[in-house]
Image (spheres, helix red, strand yellow):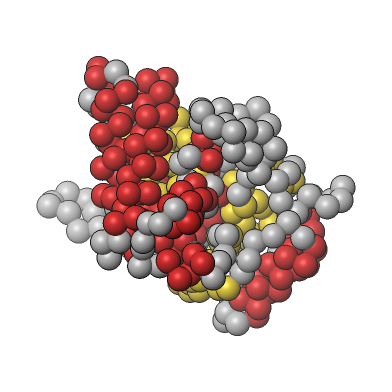
Amino acid sequence: MKNILHLFIKHGDLSIADISKEMDMSVPTITKLIGRLIEEGYVLDFGKQETNGGRRPNIYGLNPEACYFIGVDIRHFTIHIALANFKGEIIKIKRNIPFVLENTPYCLDHLCSIISSFIDKIAIEKSKIKNVAINISGRVNSESGYSYSLFYFDEKPVAQTIEDAIDIPVSIDNDSRAMAYGEYMCGTNGEKNILFINVSWGLGIGMILDGQLYYGKSGFSGEFGHYPAADNEILCHCGKKGCLETEASGQAIYRMMKEKIENGSSTSIEDKFRQNTVTMDDIVHATLHDDVLSIEAMEHVGSYLGRHLAGLINIFNPELVVIGGDLSIVGDYLVLPIRSAIRKYSLNLVNKDTVVRATRLGDDVGIMGACMLARSKMLKLI
């Protein structure tokens, strides 16, 4: 029956004849299965559909109140958290909750308390919330519930630790992969081969290949930021030198701007740099308000990133490359240098069918992805 629910998620409301055709199953069998889903409360009968003559079919669709899901999108300095219904509609969202991401037990406790506080304030029975999906940066095994880059303190998976604290099933996934899934489910036009580039404090990638979220053998796919591409001696937080994100990420922009300021360059946010209070939002805001140093840093990162995305395009031949994450808010200041470098360094025959654009979901792409993952994991669709 989960295949029928997946059809409703993918196509919206359908008739029994539509479902029968899509699944290549008999009308009586589909009728019986739909009846069971209605009894279980997952599907509603919306009555007859208006047609241009002929017998009017009944239309069926997901019951939005069947159950609910919570998505949690952890950023470097904030958290977004949202409640979605069974149709995938966001019915409550709280953005930019102050939060400093650190690999400490205190930080994990703070995360649990933020989620618990959100649950306490929504007018939904706790038993109807079927899954809480949490986006975490770095190496995450969504099947085991372990995060190896953050909150890896003891033998218990971090997903289980949070589940014990909030008393609701919890799943975790890599933040870039969640963004890719959010864009795929809510921001595309049927493309099935997608590279989602998460340009935030760090750099990651989520991949949709042939319509499926790609995890790799151990669930660690997407560590594009640690591709050994940079010709420098900068030590990455992973412990190695030459990682791509040391030249193409938010932290790279911060470092470059700081060095330029120390060497005499000026910027509208110079005081914040000197006081060590500058944030990614400050740099984004400065870029959008024509701050030359910020724009130059964005262009450098875009060009550097585009050159190495060209290699991925040559390998995967995707229909769509989506630029998302905290820095994508600057739009063409980042996207245009990426496009230019991709055209310069990738094979023309390969890149001519690839669209490169910013995410259509804006700053909500991560939280949308978390909510969609929560539903799909509850239904065992991924």
Q: Spot the residue most to the left.
A: 52
Q: Spot the residue most to the front.
A: 264
Label count reads 0
Residue 174 seen from this side? yes
Q: Is residue 369 left or right of residue 117?
A: left
* Coordinates of residue 375 in the picture (x, y in percent): 55, 54
Q: Is residue 211 above or below residue 283?
A: above
Q: Is residue 178 left or right of residue 142?
A: left
* Coordinates of residue 78 in the picture (x, y in percent): 55, 67
Q: Is residue 151 above or below residue 380?
A: below
Check the picture and name the quadrant holding the C terminus.
top right
Q: Is residue 51 above or below residue 195?
A: below
- Residue at the image position 17 percent from the left and 54 percent from the top: 51
Q: Is residue 147 left or right of residue 318?
A: right
- Residue at the image position 41 percent from the left and 61 percent from the top: 283
- Residue at the image position 26 percent from the left and 27 percent from the top: 343
Q: Spot the residue most to the right.
A: 155
Check the picture and name the quadrant holding the N terminus.
top right
* Coordinates of residue 265 in the picture (x, y in percent): 37, 56
* Coordinates of residue 206 in the picture (x, y in percent): 49, 39
**Residue sitting nearer the eye, 329 or 189:** 329
- Residue at the image position 56 percent from the left and 60 percent from the top: 75
Residue 215 seen from this side? no
**Residue sitting nearer the eye, 42 or 222:** 222
Which quadrant would residue 144 be assigned to in this image?
top right
